[in-house]
Image (cartoon, rainbow, N blue to C red):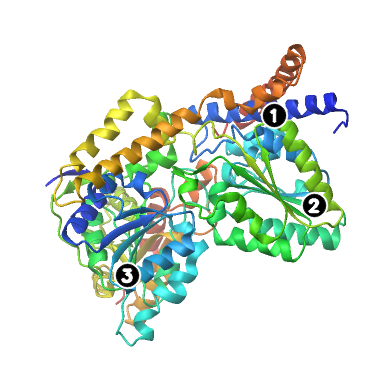
């Protein structure tokens, strides 16, 4: 056990998987620089720099996975999946279904996601709702270094295609690389518990699809993931000072969604607040509402999400992304609503 | 633009200086923390940009990548509005909502993108609209050598060729795809690749503004007269790395950084299991080679501004440079004053 940053933890897991299983290879743009530790240790046959060709890259990873390798393919930013979505949407996600479960695609798409450092809406999206809506794709979004390591291991072991999203605000490496923290003159609202933490030297896989209760509470269930989990924990502190007891459930994966954990916590607390950095419509927050309706949970519900294209100006960006004041205010309004009836 | 060689060179040099000082200012604002996120400067591309944009006017369109400040400056976008945009001010070119990678100006039919290769499809649309609605107008696309491995750009080159669109594709060949040497990633070579679509490819030294100017003049005239698209392949430098704070540049400019980056790699030489020793040493050497290439390529002798200045009497060059500097400094003062509540 030792302290690791978010990205170091993922790379530790990756090295472990590569050491244990020769079929694990890393492909992507600039990966020999980004994952230079793995490059030096495992050599150029297992860490391959690709051209800036996302379609070919994803399709190649898929073909390699179908034929016996276990590729971890890096797409840099989840936003760039837009360039190559066909390979995931129409191919990788479909094989298992088209073959009646006879042929799988054990590939991991690793991508940086999320905002809060001023790159604007073409580089800061979450998109996990969109991806999780495609049958056949697994989508994981860790919020701590330990989970990041464990979920990477689980994603590599998972027999189907998975998308592993690494929030840039939690990743010292990405912030350094993109946010320019090397200049020392900028500060970002980084949740410390997400950016650094204890990680086992040989981490175990974290089962995919199992949510983690990060804080228990009696009055309100906050449901979130990624950086949102930390915003919820901070909001819960503020609410606690007002005498309000909020639980925080970290989903850890969007698909599969830990439906039972959400429903149980909703029933127990009587109110649900979803905090989702992804877009409002057609995504996770609506899925949670549908789940509650389907299971007959009539708890008052609200959501704090990203409602529009993420603007460039830092102040505007901070306002658009889910933040503590918005979460706290929405939680208060939720408490004022008649409710609790299960 | 003037037509006599002397006056034309002076005008081109002035544009290059305006671009350079504006980007120098952006770099300083970024280092002061007044600009967040990534910052990709086009330092080293001034001759390509000035030489091409000099041939454009009202009704012509620009499809740009994320090094879009230089063409916008050369095209005459208001400097203060541009600086205010990057400062995130609501008085900026796009209300502070687009920022450095997404600079847009409808008045100039100029749009940027942070997605590699995206200027290819866009320029085809601009070209199609020009042919349909603005006869004699053209559209120009700027992209880097790293972008030629994007399918969408290859599709766009083909589309422009078979539809004979009034388009000029300008490939700024700085020989890098972010931190990877593009020659290692581009099968068949860049020139043959770009020439595979049946339209002419004009290779030009992109550090020489006079050569770019003449090549671009012919390509734009061809497009205007319905002769179809042309590719200009312009070799140029990348003086400030892929973006400010580029780890590869930092690696070579700070001893502390070098030690911090290399030390953990040494442990990987021995960690077991792993690749055979020869493969590991080769990998480490590969990383070192990239860093060395960055150092070797950075010398200012490749600076297109110096090359351009050599065509001019020294006093004239100095006068033009100071004229550009004064204009940019005025714009910065104004921008910082107006952005004050935001930054």
SS for callout 1: helix
Whether residue A281 can be seen here: no
Residue position for label 3: A65
Badge 1: few (under 14), some or many (20 or more) residues near its Cα, within 10 Å? many
Residue position for label 2: B138
Q: Chain of mark 2?
A: B
SS for callout 2: loop
Residue nearest the viewer, comparing A321 with A36: A36
B159 vs B43, left or right, is right
Quick one: which residue is furthest to the left in this view?
Answer: A1
> Residue at the spot x=26%, y=45% of the render?
A40
Residue nearest the viewer, comparing A236 with B245: B245
Badge 2: few (under 14), some or many (20 or more) residues near its Cα, within 10 Å? many
Screen quadrant of the N terminus of chain B: top right
> Residue at the spot x=24%, y=51% of the render?
A42
Pointer 1 or 2: first along the chain: 1
The answer to whether residue B216 is above or below residue A292 is above
Q: Chain of mark 1?
A: B
Q: Chain of mark 3?
A: A
Q: How many marks?
A: 3
Q: Which mark is residue B16?
A: 1
The answer to whether residue A84 is above or below residue A289 is above
What is the CA distance from the residue labelled 1 to the residue labelled 3? Answer: 50 Å
What is the CA distance from the residue labelled 1 to the residue labelled 2? Answer: 22 Å
Figure quadrant of residue A108: bottom left
- Dots 1, 3 in contact, CB < 8 A: no
Residue B195, given in percent of the width and then of the height, sits at: 66, 55
Kindly indicate whether the residues beneath marks 1 and 2 are on one polypeptide chain: yes
Residue B239, given in percent of the width and then of the height, sits at: 54, 31
SS for callout 3: helix
């Amino acid at each position: 056990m030792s302290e690791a940053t978010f990205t170091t933890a993922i790379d530790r897991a990756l090295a472990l998987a590569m050491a244990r299983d020769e079929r694990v290879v890393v492909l992507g743009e600039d990966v020999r620089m980004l994952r230079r530790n793995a490059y030096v240790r495992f050599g150029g046959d297992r860490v391959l720099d690709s051209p800036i060709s996302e379609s070919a890259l994803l399709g190649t990873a898929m073909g390699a996975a179908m034929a016996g390798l276990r590729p971890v393919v890096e797409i840099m930013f989840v936003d760039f999946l837009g360039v190559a979505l066909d390979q995931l949407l129409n191919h990788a996600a479909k094989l298992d279904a088209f073959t009646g479960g006879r042929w799988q695609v054990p590939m991991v798409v690793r991508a940086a996601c999320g905002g809060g450092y001023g790159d604007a809406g073409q580089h800061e999206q979450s998109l996990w709702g969109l991806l999780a809506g495609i049958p056949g794709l697994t989508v994981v979004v860790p919020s701590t270094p330990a989970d990041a390591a464990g979920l990477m291991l689980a994603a590599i072991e998972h027999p189907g295609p998975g998308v592993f999203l690494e929030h840039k605000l939690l990743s010292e490496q990405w912030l350094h690389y993109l946010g320019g923290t090397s200049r020392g003159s900028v500060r970002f609202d980084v949740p410390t518990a997400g950016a650094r933490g204890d990680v086992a030297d040989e981490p175990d896989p974290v089962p995919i699809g199992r949510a983690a209760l990060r804080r228990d509470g009696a009055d309100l269930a906050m449901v979130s993931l990624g950086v949102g989990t930390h915003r919820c924990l901070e909001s819960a502190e503020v609410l606690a000072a007002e005498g309000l007891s909020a639980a925080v459930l970290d989903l850890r994966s969007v698909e599969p969604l830990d439906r039972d954990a959400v429903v149980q916590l909703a029933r127990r607390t009587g109110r649900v607040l979803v905090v989702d950095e992804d877009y409002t419509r057609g995504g996770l927050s609506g899925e949670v509402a549908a789940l509650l309706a389907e299971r007959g949970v009539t708890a008052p519900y609200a959501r704090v999400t990203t409602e529009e294209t993420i603007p460039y100006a830092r102040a505007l960006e901070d306002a658009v992304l889910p933040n503590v004041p918005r979460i706290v205010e929405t939680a208060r309004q939720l408490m004022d609503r008649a409710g609790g009836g299960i | 633009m003037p037509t006599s060689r002397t006056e034309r060179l002076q005008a081109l040099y002035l544009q290059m200086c305006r671009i350079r000082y504006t980007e120098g200012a952006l770099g300083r604002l970024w280092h002061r923390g007044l600009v967040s996120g990534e910052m990709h400067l086009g330092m080293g591309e001034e001759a390509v940009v000035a030489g091409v944009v000099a041939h454009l006017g009202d009704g012509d369109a620009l499809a740009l990548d994320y090094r879009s400040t230089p063409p916008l400056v050369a095209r005459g976008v208001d400097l203060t509005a541009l600086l205010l945009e990057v400062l995130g001010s609501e008085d900026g070119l796009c209300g502070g909502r687009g920022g450095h990678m997404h600079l847009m100006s409808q008045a100039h039919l100029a749009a940027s993108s942070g997605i590699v290769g995206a200027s290819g499809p866009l320029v085809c649309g601009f070209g199609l609209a020009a042919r349909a609605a603005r006869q004699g107008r053209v559209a120009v696309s700027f992209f880097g050598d790293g972008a030629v491995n994007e399918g969408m750009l290859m599709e766009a080159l083909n589309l422009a060729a078979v539809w004979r669109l009034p388009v000029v594709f300008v490939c700024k060949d700085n020989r890098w795809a972010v931190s990877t040497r593009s020659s290692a990633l581009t099968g068949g070579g860049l020139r043959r690749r770009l020439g595979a679509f049946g339209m002419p490819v004009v290779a030009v030294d992109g550090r020489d503004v006079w050569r770019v100017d003449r090549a671009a003049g012919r390509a734009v005239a061809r497009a205007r007269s319905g002769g179809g698209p042309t590719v200009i392949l312009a070799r140029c430098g990348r003086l400030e790395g892929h973006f400010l704070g580029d780890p590869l540049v930092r690696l070579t400019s700070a001893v502390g950084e070098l030690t911090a980056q290399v030390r953990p790699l040494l442990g990987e030489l021995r960690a077991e299991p792993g690749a055979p020793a020869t493969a590991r040493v080769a990998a480490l050497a590969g990383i070192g080679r990239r860093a060395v290439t960055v150092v070797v390529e950075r010398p200012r002798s490749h600076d297109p501004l110096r090359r351009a200045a050599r065509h001019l009497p020294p006093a004239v060059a100095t006068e033009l440079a100071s004229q550009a500097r004064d204009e940019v400094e005025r714009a910065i003062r104004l921008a910082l004053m107006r952005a004050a509540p935001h930054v």
